[in-house]
Amino acid sequence: MRRLLTVLAALATLSLTNCGYNAIQSQDEQIKSSWSEVVNQYQRRADLVPNLVNSVKGFAQQEKDVLLGVTNARAKVGSIQASPETLNDPAAFNKFQQAQGELSGALSRLLVVTENYPQLKSDALFRDLMSQLEGTENRITVARNRYIKSVQDYNVTVRSFPSNLTAMMFGYKEKPNFTVENEKAISTAPKVDFNPAPAPAPAPAPSPTPAPAK
């Protein structure tokens, strides 16, 4: 009897392996890991925003609308709870993505404004914050790309035969992925040129008027 149970258990294990169960489990865990890194890097960016706004405010108080836009976008991001359950709720995932996109847009507008304030761009604290922001945006891009690849692999598995039957049996569904109108633009880290703009070249001296012929 014991031998029969052992054989049945081995056959069940082999069946689950061949039908994609183990692959689904592995890919699901990879998605959760990738998602955690995405959330961590977005949170790192959000944590930089208050100090960045205060730094700009010290030099450009008249830019109230732009500063308020960044502050509001950051508050919206903070109001959204990004948990592993978000991955199983396309509406919640889209809400998260939209909020992060709005913050990206607000930060881009802020960086455009800073170009008009040479003293701000030479401030040591601002330069340090911008360096941190650029590095964080780069890490966000890497984390997003890993998540996108993980979801693509998983979604192919749960749609392909015969693993799709296993997915249906155990309740595994396709997961939402990042979709933006311009992925290239959102994947470009913000850059600020801290070097002063070169002085315009002097206009060439006018050619001497030739003396009239006698």
Image (cartoon, rainbow, N blue to C red):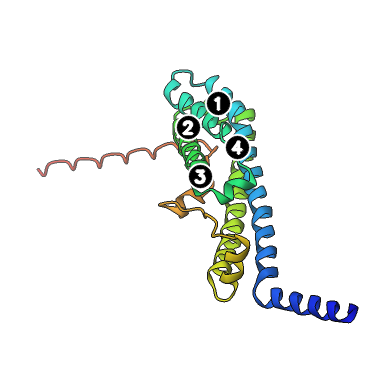
- For disc 1, the marked residue is 53
Type of amino acid at the residue the image marks with label 4: Gln
Q: Which residue type carries mark 2? A: Leu
Up/down of 170 relative to 56, above or below: below
Disc 2: CA contacts within 10 A as few (<14), some (14-19) or many (>=20) = many
Q: CA distance from mark 1 to mark 4?
A: 23 Å
Q: Determine whether label 1 and label 4 are within 8 Å by CB.
A: no
Sequence-earlier tag: 2 or 3: 3
**Seen in the image, is 18 located left or right of residue 165?**
right
Residue 171 higher or lower than 23, as above or below:
above
Q: Position of residue 96 (x, y in %)?
A: 52, 42
Q: Closer to the camera, 96 or 65?
A: 96
Q: Based on the displayed image, in which of its 4 quarters is residue 79 positioned?
A: top right
Mark 3 to mark 4 CA distance (whole Å) = 12 Å
Residue 110 has which mark?
Answer: 2
Decide which of tag 3 and tag 4 comes sooner along the chain: 4
Disc 3 secondary structure class? helix
Q: Label 4 crowding class (10 Å Cα cut-off): few <14, some 14-19, many 20+?
A: few
Q: What is the C-alpha distance between the residues marked 2 and 4?
A: 25 Å
Image height of 48 relative to 64, above or below: below
Q: Are marks 2 and 4 in contact (CB under 8 Å)?
A: no
Q: Quadrant of residue 12?
A: bottom right
For discs 1 and 3, the disc positioned in front in the rendered view: 3
Q: Which label was assigned to residue 97? A: 3
- Structural distance between the alpha carbons of marks 1 and 3: 22 Å
On residue 81, which mark appears? 4
Q: Given this view, does label 1 or label 4 mark the residue nearer the observer? A: 4
Residue visible at 48% across and 48% down in the picture: 186
Q: Helix, strand, or loop for circle 4?
A: loop
- Quadrant showing the C terminus: top left
